[in-house]
Image (cartoon, rainbow, N blue to C red):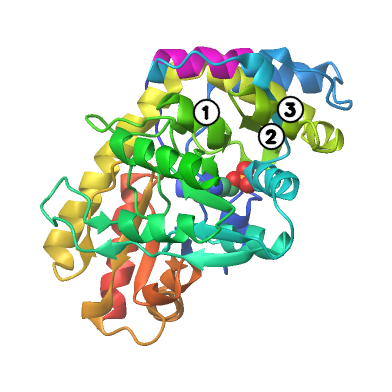
Amino acid sequence: MTDSNVQALSLAELTTHHSEKWSGFDSDVLPLPVAEMDFPIADPIRKVLLDMVTSSDLGYLGLVPELGAGFAKFAHERWNWIVDTSQVRVAADVGVGVVEVLRVFTQPGDSVLINSPIYQNFYNWINETRLTKIDIPFTRTGSEAEGSNPWVLDFDEVEKIYASGLKVHLLCSPHNPLGRIYSKNELIRIADMAKKYGVLVISDEIHSPLTFTPHEFTPFLTVSDAAREVGVAVTSATKAWNLAGLKCAIIVSQNDAIHKKLEEMPKAVHFRASILGAYASAAAFADGGPWLDAVIKNLDDNRFLLRDLLKDQLPTVRYNIPHNGYLAWLDMSSLNLGESPAETLLQKGRVALNPGSLYGEQSTQYVRLNFATSPEIITEAMKRIVSTLK
Ligand SMILES: Cc1ncc(COP(=O)(O)O)c(C=O)c1O
């Protein structure tokens, strides 16, 4: 296998893994929750990790200009974004990055807007910082035609909340679990509103490298001067190159005033990241392009494989092919699997998916399925879901 021809590991290999996904369930359960991938890591990352371990280079993290430079190279190549690397900071992970940015810009009790269903840790980050959550959920009111994404955000409602004294809009861009990409016009509108009403936009862009053609991801900080005046992006290589356990993310601003304010973050935010994570992430951004493209090809095939399997075996399950990432958001309500379809599938079908209720209280009949694995495992998962209905 080479970086331009990546295939998922076999089930036998995967069951030896120590990660939460592969060690968190009984051995007869097929696990497809937790957003990590089942592919072997990219060669440039393997090399840097092996070199550092072999030479016992495992001390505290110092300055790591390679990381900002790698990100800037990637951002320029993929999104035509010229990043000022002096405004790329390091954090231990995206969660820590978001929480530390929130600590600088808010006081406990301030209000934060989210748009559910949303990555479950958004709720935890808001609780951790003692902020007040305001939710304007996405509604499933757009086109269900194949290729479109039906999830719609009511921007007039968003503006009303912005105008009511909101402090922060926590954006998941691209969106987990909806696989939805914000259009450039949507982001421009968010930036304009944020500037008008004094709202900070924190854009979690961790899934952005995993975007399927012809869809295009637009980094928030590229859309306008207003976006740079109101925005902070938090992202990492850990989702797209599958390095979550290595603990490294970046906090990016592109505006002097925001940059200055972020100086208030504790210095420790930087060195709490891991040295292996920082250098692996730098290698991913700088040299991981061929591997990433090969993985996107696998994921692209898998999102359609899932469509075909569902059409064939579970045609009443609603699934919109995601525009980004490897998470399928499945509406199981037609299957009558009880209060928690994920729990029923786990108990009866021995297949683990994430319960929709984690992402929003309105989503109890949904499950999130991770298709960043082999076609064989996806096919087996489908078999187990179908077997639950018998
Ligand atoms: C939108 C989003 N943000 C952040 C994370 C987690 O990032 P980290 O482990 O760097 O905190 C995930 C993981 O699935 C995610 O989907």
**In the image, residue 302 lies at what x, y percent?**
28, 44
Q: Disc 3 and disc 2: Cα gap in Å?
A: 22 Å
Q: Is residue 72 magenta?
A: yes
**In the image, residue 334 lies at what x, y percent?**
21, 79
Looking at the image, can residue 277 be seen? no
**SS for tag 3?**
helix
Q: Nearer the viewer, residue 276 or 388?
A: 276
| Amino acid type of the residue tagged 2 in the rendering | Cys
- Residue found at x 54% / y 36%: 230
Q: Is residue 316 above or below residue 80?
A: below
Q: Nearer the viewer, residue 102 or 45?
A: 102
Classify residue 298 as left or right of residue 201.
left
Q: Nearer the viewer, residue 155 or 122?
A: 155
Q: Is mark 2 within 8 Å of ligand 1?
A: no
Q: Quadrant of the N terminus?
A: top left
First of labels 2, 1 by sequence position: 1
First of labels 3, 2 by sequence position: 2
First to last magenta residue range: 69-77
- Residue found at x 53% / y 24%: 42
The residue labelled by disc 2 is: 248
First of labels 3, 1 by sequence position: 1
**In the image, residue 18 lies at what x, y percent?**
66, 50
Classify residue 73 as left or right of residue 128.
left
**SS for tag 1?**
helix
**In the image, residue 239 lies at what x, y percent?**
53, 39
Q: Is residue 368 magenta?
A: no
Q: Is residue 85 above or below residue 117?
A: above
The residue labelled by disc 3 is: 260
The residue labelled by disc 1 is: 228
Q: Main secondary structure of the magenta part?
A: helix
- Crowd band around label 3 with a 10 angstrom C-alpha radius: few (<14), some (14–19), many (20+): few
Q: Quadrant of the C terminus?
A: bottom left
